[in-house]
């Protein structure tokens, strides 16, 4: 076999860094083919790092899926909840564009994201702990009663509360999520990951957006304690990450990153 | 992932699928949590449009739930799910074509790589551009192999092609990507 044949073999491998013995032996003595292998491995690893825009509709989807009518689900559609018209069975609620944010639905959006986040938190905790799931109440749309209470409570909060109440409630929620993540750091990396994901949503979708709606003259006083708390969360999350296994540590570092980003943006909003 | 961990995950997944087949939505919600990101990621790289990818991801999961009875226990749930996702993507593409709206990928695939991108250090971004430049069938196969780590046989199952064709598409995709990246590497070595 010549280099060309070996290179074709490399390109056809399942994993370019796991060459069979004969190919490996050739690679040992051929710099050109080794370089090709290096590039292939680099390519493979880099593809896994390709950036991906956040998909916020996952939380809403789960909430709506869990409360949807069984007949709709059997048909592969989802019409429960505040669906918007669209070509797909479930039009996604994703990050709205700035033009849409100026319109009244903003409260609804915050509420949905918040309610979904809390609902999902309970779902995730329940599922990941493998505890017995409380059976849904007949006629209640299939949702766990505890989730229903949380969702209803948070919807009310999102609709009726002032921006200050909202941002403070959301900051409390972020704290709770971090405490929960911290609690499971050594034993349940999947829970830590779930909490980190929710933390991300609550901070980015909830805290920051609500903070932006605060009257500019009151931002500094309202946001200062929240900035402190988020800074502390970032530091503590890093500290806990050091003592945790790699999977939980990765989630905790992500959580710390989100907290730092939150601090940075809140400082800008506060005019610091 | 070690073999024992992989086995535990598979067994956990089989249990969730079984529960979901009996109508347990919470079990399916756990499967949604497990697969949302990978399905969305793949569909985003195929469609190159966030909203489309999100819509198709939701559609995929709803169709999967509705069709769970047809899923055969013991087969690969991930591959089955990606097959549904791919069908959804093809349908979407066809609908776009009928409406005579050019697909983003068709537009981007002809775009030359700007010189500045070959000169800077944003290697990952450059790779993203190159992957986007692949035709969708090469891109689909390549990403299923690299990101989802499906076997060539499973890729064939997802895309409705033979195992050999799947291997060939991944081979060609790698070759095209290496060629597209050649100026970058040449620049780095000079």
Image: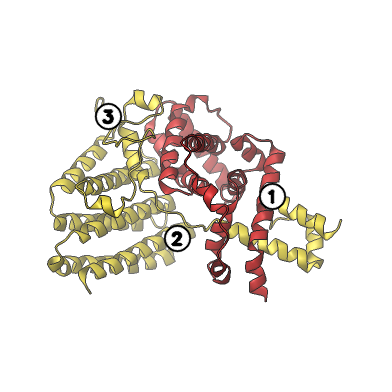
Chain colours: A yellow, B red
Q: In this orientation, does residue B135 appear?
A: yes
Identify the residue under disc 3: A141
Q: CA distance from mark 3 to mark 1?
A: 50 Å
Image marks 1 and 2: residues in contact by CB distance under 8 Å: no
> How dense is the environment of label 1, judged by Cα within 10 Å: few (below 14), some, or many (20 and up)?
some
Left or right: where A8 falls relative to A51: right
Q: Residue furthest front?
A: B100
Q: Which residue is mark 2?
A: A250
Q: Position of residue B189 (x, y in %)?
A: 67, 74
Which residue is identified by label 1?
A: B172
A241 relative to B66, above or below: below
Above or below, A248 relative to A103: below
Indicate whether A47 appears above or below A260: above
Instruction: Return the x and y of residue B77 as percentages of the image width and height.
Output: 54, 36
Mark 2 element type: helix
Name the residue nearer the viewer: A98 or A213.
Answer: A98
- In which quadrant of the rendered image does the C terminus of chain B lie? bottom right
Which of these two is toward me, A218 or B119?
B119
Q: Earlier in the sequence, mark 2 or mark 3?
A: 3
Task: State the residue at coordinates (26%, 25%).
Answer: A138
Q: Dot 1 falls on which chain?
A: B
């Amino acid at each position: 076999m010549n280099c060309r044949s070996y290179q074709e073999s490399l390109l056809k491998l399942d994993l370019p860094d796991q060459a069979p013995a004969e190919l490996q032996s050739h690679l040992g003595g051929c710099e050109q083919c080794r370089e090709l292998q290096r590039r292939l491995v680099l390519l493979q690893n880099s593809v896994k790092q390709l950036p991906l825009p956040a998909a916020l509709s996952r939380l809403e989807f789960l909430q709506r899926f869990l409360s949807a009518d069984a007949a709709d689900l059997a048909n592969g559609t989802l019409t429960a909840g505040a669906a918007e018209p669209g070509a797909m069975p479930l039009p996604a609620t994703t990050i709205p564009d700035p033009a849409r944010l100026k319109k009244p639905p903003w409260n609804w959006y915050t509420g949905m994201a918040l309610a979904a986040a809390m609902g999902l938190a309970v779902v995730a905790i329940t599922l990941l702990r493998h505890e017995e799931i409380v059976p849904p109440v007949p006629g209640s749309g299939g949702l766990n009663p505890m989730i229903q209470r949380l969702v209803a409570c948070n919807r009310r909060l999102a609709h009726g509360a002032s921006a200050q109440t909202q941002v403070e409630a959301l900051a409390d929620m972020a704290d709770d999520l971090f405490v929960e993540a911290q609690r499971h750091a050594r034993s349940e990396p999947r829970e830590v990951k779930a909490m980190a994901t929710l933390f991300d949503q609550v901070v980015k979708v909830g805290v920051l957006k609500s903070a932006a709606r605060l009257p500019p003259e009151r931002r500094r006083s309202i946001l200062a304690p929240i900035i402190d708390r988020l800074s502390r969360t970032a530091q503590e999350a890093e500290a806990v990450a050091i003592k945790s296994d790699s999977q939980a540590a990765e989630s905790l570092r992500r959580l710390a990153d989100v907290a730092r980003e939150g601090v940075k943006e809140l400082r800008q909003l506060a005019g610091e | 992932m070690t073999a024992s961990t992989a086995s535990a995950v598979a067994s956990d997944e089989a249990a969730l699928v079984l529960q979901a087949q009996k109508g347990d939505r919470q079990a399916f919600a756990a499967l949604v949590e497990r697969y949302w990101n990978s399905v969305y990621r793949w569909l985003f790289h195929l469609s190159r449009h966030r909203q489309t990818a999100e819509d198709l991801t939701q559609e995929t999961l709803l169709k999967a739930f509705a069709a769970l009875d047809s899923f055969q226990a013991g087969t690969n749930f991930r591959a089955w799910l990606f097959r549904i996702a791919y069908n959804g993507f093809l349908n979407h593409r066809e609908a776009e074509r009928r409406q005579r709206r050019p697909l983003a990928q068709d537009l981007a695939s002809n775009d030359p790589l700007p010189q500045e991108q070959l000169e800077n250090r944003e290697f990952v971004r450059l790779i993203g551009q190159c992957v986007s430049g692949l035709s969708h069938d090469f891109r689909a196969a390549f990403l299923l192999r690299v990101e989802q780590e499906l076997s060539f046989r499973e890729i064939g199952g997802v895309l409705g092609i033979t195992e050999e064709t799947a291997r060939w598409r991944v081979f060609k995709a790698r070759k095209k990507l290496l060629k597209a990246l050649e100026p970058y590497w040449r620049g780095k070595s000079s």
